[in-house]
């Protein structure tokens, strides 16, 4: 099976957000970067799929050349190769231009199944996976928390507000991965050493203008200073009064 | 007036609140709305919609098995044929599954989880959170069709009125993936993103069994509340990920958020800071959760929560 896991280099989740002088982009100077949380689950599922069905796993990203750090870390968990669509202006890309660039590369590489995280923890848009599938004309299951593959088809489960949905699909497919699908492994020393020798290609992504225009960015106003009502169960009565008369939520 | 295609969800004919809010967002922005319904019960949904304020209703027939790719292809075809300049859906699990595919069919960008929509500048302008709400981005689309999903609880449902005509159209046949079943949640429990009250628990509860305190308090709200959880207790296996609030879970903005034994890591605060009123109950008076809480009680959850549960039950009984 030809397997691809798409990952994104994102600011660490404990990052404090600062906005730069232009007021339309982030001040990234203090950011530490990491592979997006759900993309780690995608990489794990890709490696597990290789282990049970055979084949090769390629880690694919669109980002700066520095993303080789994240790609190597993912290769170290059991993938075979990496490809970076290098774009210094990656922060300005929108879901559409990213999905189109990934789709073009995936078409060129060829794949039976592509794994993505269900959402990247920077822009929170949850769009690239299903858009990519649509540009490719493939099946797609988003937010998968269970997956079974069987030759040319598969079944997956995804959590909705109404309960767990069972979805059957045909391959090739794009699967976006939710927490619960697996427990991402740590890279062992052997994997880290081996990853250094695996091929990591850089290529230019398909040029595509971003359609999402950022007019301005702001950090939300801090919440007004709250108050400690009191201590212990004795404070409950005052809390009820406050919720009723001040906040008017009861 | 600019035309918009809206994907409206329903459960066996009963319109979903998040979808009505999406309709409210579109109508408030002055869009000429065609609301699209499909699936079992769509007849009833269509007639409920005809007096909702929507300008037209389209019932896609024959789509009794749910397929997100088929729905997306049909919705995109409707948008193209009608010359729509906007496509909107609610940012639910289903809406977020379908909308990106519609956007790709229309070769348009997509804004997920928008929290405002405004056409006063002449084109549609929207705000949406980045980094789980640490940043609010104001955006416009340069695409032919403005595509977005509306965050639950961020918009008001329309007041209703009018009597829109319902047209029927056959759904297409091709589907690459389809839903073969749904295992319903126990007792029709509310989702943490849709509830108007969220009671969330964290590590301060000490043991998985003590989460029943949180459930008891949620139950006291008589069906209006859902339970939430911090990442620590989801990772510990006490609660399912579907209940996790925060940057790697769900972002919620209920009317009332009650945090029990949650210290308030930055990733958790990002997931609940837009709640209208926040109450925190924590033993540690220095816990960061008190910085965002409107009302705090310093104390032992095992003492405070039962008293609060009883008081809320009393308030509910009087109402």
Image (cartoon, helix red, strand yellow):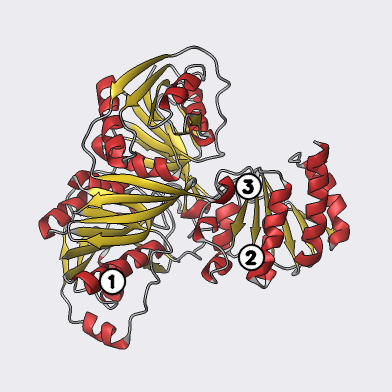
**Foreground residue among B67 and A109:** B67
The part of the image, by quadrant, that contains residue B96 is top left
Secondary structure at numbered mark 2: loop
Label 1 sits on residue: A48
Where's residue A214, x and y in %?
Answer: 39, 42
> Could you tell me how far apart the alpha carbons at marks 1 and 3 are, in whole angstroms?
39 Å
> Could you tell me how far apart the alpha carbons at marks 1 and 2 are, in whole angstroms?
32 Å
Where's residue B121, x and y in %?
Answer: 44, 26
Label 3 sits on residue: B275
Residue A241 badge = none
- Check chain identity for marks 1 and 3: say if they share one: no
Crowding at dot 1, Cα within 10 Å, few <14 / some 14-19 / many 20+, comes out as: some
Q: Quadrant of the C terminus of chain B?
A: top right
The part of the image, by quadrant, that contains residue A89 is bottom left
| Residue contact at pointers 2 and 3, CB within 8 angstroms | no
Label 2 sits on residue: B202
Give whichever of discs 2 and 3 has the lower sequence position: 2
- Check chain identity for marks 1 and 2: say if they share one: no
Q: Residue at x 27, y 75 (%)?
A: A72
Q: Nearer the viewer, mark 1 or mark 3?
A: 1
- The chain identifier of the residue carrying mark 3 reads B
Query: How many discs appear?
Result: 3
């Amino acid at each position: 099976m030809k397997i691809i896991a798409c990952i994104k280099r994102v600011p660490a989740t404990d990052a404090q957000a600062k906005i730069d002088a232009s007021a339309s982009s982030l001040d990234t100077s203090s950011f530490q970067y990491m592979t997006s949380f759900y993309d780690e689950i995608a990489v794990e599922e890709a490696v597990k799929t290789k282990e049970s069905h055979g084949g090769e796993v390629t880690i694919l990203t669109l980002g700066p050349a520095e993303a080789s750090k994240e790609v190597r870390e993912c290769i170290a968990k059991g993938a075979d190769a990496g490809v970076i669509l290098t774009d210094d202006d990656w922060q300005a890309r929108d879901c559409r231009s990213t999905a189109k660039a990934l789709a073009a590369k995936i078409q060129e590489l060829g794949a039976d199944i592509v794994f993505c995280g269900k959402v990247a923890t920077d822009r929170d848009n949850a769009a690239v996976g299903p858009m990519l599938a649509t540009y490719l004309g493939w099946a797609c299951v988003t937010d998968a928390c269970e997956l079974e593959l069987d030759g040319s088809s598969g079944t997956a489960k995804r959590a909705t507000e109404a309960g767990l949905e069972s979805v059957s699909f045909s391959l090739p497919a794009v699967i976006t991965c939710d927490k619960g699908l697996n427990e991402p492994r740590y890279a062992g020393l052997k994997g880290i050493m081996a990853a250094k020798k695996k091929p990591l290609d850089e290529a230019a992504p398909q040029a595509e203008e971003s359609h999402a225009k950022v007019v301005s960015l702001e950090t939300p106003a801090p919440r007004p200073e709250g108050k400690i009502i009191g201590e212990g169960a004795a404070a409950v009565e005052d809390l009820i009064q406050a919720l009723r008369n001040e906040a008017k939520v009861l | 007036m600019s035309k918009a295609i809206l994907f409206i969800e329903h459960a066996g004919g009963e319109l979903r609140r998040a979808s009505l809010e999406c309709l409210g967002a579109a109508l408030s922005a002055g869009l000429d709305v065609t609301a699209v319904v499909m699936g079992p019960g769509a007849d009833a949904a269509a007639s409920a919609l005809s007096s909702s304020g929507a300008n037209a209703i389209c019932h896609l027939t024959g789509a009794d098995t749910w397929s997100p790719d088929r729905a997306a292809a049909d919705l995109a075809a409707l948008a193209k044929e009608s010359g729509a300049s906007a496509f909107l859906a609610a940012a639910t699990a289903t809406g977020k599954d379908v909308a990106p595919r519609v956007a790709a069919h229309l070769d348009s960008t997509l804004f997920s989880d928008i929290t405002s929509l405004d056409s006063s500048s002449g084109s549609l302008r929207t705000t949406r959170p980045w980094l789980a709400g640490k940043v609010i981005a104001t955006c416009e689309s340069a695409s032919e069709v403005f595509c977005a999903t509306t965050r639950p609880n961020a918009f008001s449902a329309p007041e209703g009125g009018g009597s829109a005509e319902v047209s029927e159209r056959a759904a297409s046949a091709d589907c690459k993936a389809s839903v073969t079943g749904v295992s319903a949640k126990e007792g029709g429990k509310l989702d943490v993103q849709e509830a108007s009250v969220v009671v969330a628990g964290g590590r301060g509860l000490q043991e998985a069994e003590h989460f029943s305190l949180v459930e008891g308090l949620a139950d006291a709200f008589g069906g209006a509340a859902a339970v939430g959880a911090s990442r620590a207790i989801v990772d510990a296996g006490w609660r399912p990920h579907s209940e996790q609030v925060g940057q790697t879970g769900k972002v919620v903005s209920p009317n009332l958020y009650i945090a029990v034994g949650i210290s308030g890591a930055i990733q958790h605060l990002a997931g609940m800071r837009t709640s209208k009123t926040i109450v925190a109950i924590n033993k540690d008076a220095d816990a960061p959760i008190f910085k965002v809480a409107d009302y705090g009680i310093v104390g032992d959850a095992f003492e405070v929560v039962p008293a609060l549960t009883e008081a809320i039950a009393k308030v509910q009984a009087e109402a």
